[in-house]
Amino acid sequence: MITTLLVKLDKDLKMKAQDTASEMGVPLSAVVNEQLRQFVVDRSLTFRAPLVPNGKTARILRKRLLDIDKGKNIVGPFRTAKEADEWLDG
C-alpha cells in the first residue's frame, strides 16, 4: 500500500534535493523512502556539525593564523613524542 506524507521544508532545499535526485536519475520520493527505511532499521539519526565555525571560533582561528604568520606563540617541532611529553609536563 502506498501513502502520502506531507512535509514542510525550505523551498530552496526542496529544489536542490530535486535537482540532485534528478542528476542521479532517481525521483526524490525514492531518496526519502530510502532514508526513512534506514531510519527504521538503524533507529538513529545523524546530524553533522556545520563546516563553518561560529563567530567566536572564527576569531580565535584568525588570531592564531596571524600568530603563525608572525612566528609567535609557536612551540616545536618536536623530534620525538617523548620530547613533546616532556615539554607538556613543563
Image (tube, grey):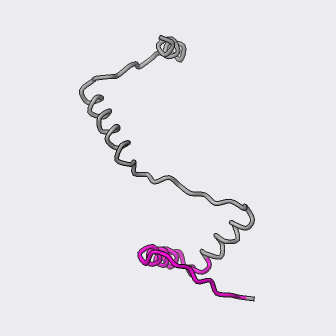
**Residue 23 in the figure: left or right of residue 27:** left
Q: Is residue 58 magenta?
A: no
Residue, x 47% and y 77% (percent of image)?
Answer: 14
Bounds of the magenta segment: 2-30
Residue, x 50% and y 79% (percent of image)?
Answer: 22
Residue, x 54% and y 13% (percent of image)?
Answer: 82
**Image quarter (top left, top right, bottom left or bottom right) of the N terminus:** bottom right
The spot of residue 29 in percent (x, y) is 60, 81
Q: Is residue 22 magenta?
A: yes
Q: Residue furthest left?
A: 70
The spot of residue 50 in percent (x, y) is 45, 54
Residue 27 vertical placement versus 43 (above, below): below
Toward the viewer: 9 or 64?
9
The spot of residue 79 in percent (x, y) is 47, 15
Residue, x 72% and y 61% (percent of image)?
Answer: 42
- Tag count in the figure? 0
**Residue 34 in the figure: left or right of residue 84:** right
Residue 9 vertical placement versus 47 (above, below): below
The spot of residue 25 in percent (x, y) is 54, 79
The image quadrant that residue 77 belongs to is top left
Residue 18 vertical placement versus 54 (above, below): below
The image quadrant that residue 2 belongs to is bottom right
**Residue 50 in the figure: left or right of residue 33:** left
